[in-house]
């Protein structure tokens, strides 16, 4: 187990990621085939909080230590290595790592963005595009993947983006939660 974690940490680091340079919150909309879901996200440099609908669970991703904290409705939490597929919904890899190329600029949610086209992005067999602001916020991501022999279209985007200092307590495990295995 320790060797796997060390290898995963060596495979990429926070210097391979385009981390946003500003605090913000937003509603994240994810469309995967016929499935539609919405989450509220909060970001402060290096840490992303994802609150799922109906209070089912909250995930806190520490992008600098590559640690994931899963807070569950029963007031327990897990500490896990960061989920590669999960962080990529919100944080882009640098073009040097992902092979993405610039493909113009567009305004999305009133923000100037640069569109990047990417090919096969790791084990997902995914290809598509993402849009980044100058401050590193990935406001949209469209891609098709070939998981399990199916070609499924994914569209992920942020709405209601608010730029404001995020309360530090959002990124901490509440005292009433207990660690579980």
Image (spheres, grey):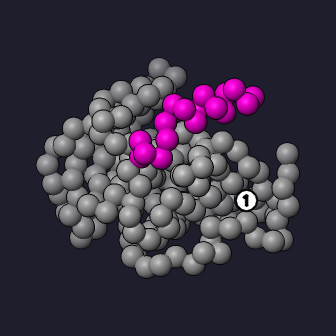
- Where is 142 relative to 4, above or below? below
* Residue at position x 67%, y 27% in the image: 4
Is residue 31 in sight in this rendering?
no
Q: Residue 85: image x %, image y %? A: 52, 40
When the figure is inspected, residue 177 is found, relative to residue 154, above or below; the finding is below
Q: Residues within 10 Å of mark 1 (few under 14, many from 20)?
A: many
**Position of residue 151 measured from the top left corner of the image (x, y, whole percent):** 40, 28
Q: Quadrant of the C terminus?
A: top right
Q: Is 7 one of the magenta-colored residues?
A: yes
Q: Which residues are magenta?
A: 1-17
Q: Residue at x 51, y 31 (%)?
A: 11
The quarter of the picture where residue 119 lies is top left
From the viewer's perspective, tell me whether residue 111 is left or right of residue 147: left
Instruction: Tell me the residue at 43%/45% (across/down).
Output: 15
Residue 20, position in %: x, y?
Answer: 39, 60
Numbered-mark total: 1
Label 1 sits on a secondary structure element that is strand
Vertical arrangement, residue 179 with respect to residue 83, above or below? below
Q: Which residue is mark 1?
A: 71
Residue 164 in view (yes/no): yes
Q: Nearer the viewer, residue 23 or 143?
A: 23
């Amino acid at each position: 187990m320790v060797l796997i974690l060390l290898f995963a940490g060596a495979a990429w680091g926070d210097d391979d990621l385009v981390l946003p340079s500003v605090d913000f919150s937003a509603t994240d909309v994810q469309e995967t085939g016929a499935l539609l879901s919405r989450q509220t996200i909060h970001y402060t440099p290096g840490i992303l909080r994802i609150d799922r609908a109906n209070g089912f669970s909250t995930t806190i991703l520490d992008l600098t230590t590559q640690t994931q904290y899963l807070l569950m409705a029963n007031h327990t939490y897990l500490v896990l290595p960061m989920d590669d597929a999960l962080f990529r919904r919100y944080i882009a890899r640098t073009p040097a790592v992902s092979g993405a190329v610039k493909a113009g600029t567009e305004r999305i949610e009133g923000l100037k963005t640069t569109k990047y086209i990417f090919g096969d992005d790791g084990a997902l067999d995914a290809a598509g595009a993402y849009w980044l602001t100058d401050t590193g916020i990935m406001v949209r991501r469209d891609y098709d993947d070939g998981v399990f022999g199916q070609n499924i279209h994914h569209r992920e985007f942020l709405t209601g983006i608010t730029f404001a200092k995020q309360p530090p307590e959002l990124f901490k495990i509440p005292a009433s939660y207990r660690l579980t295995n």
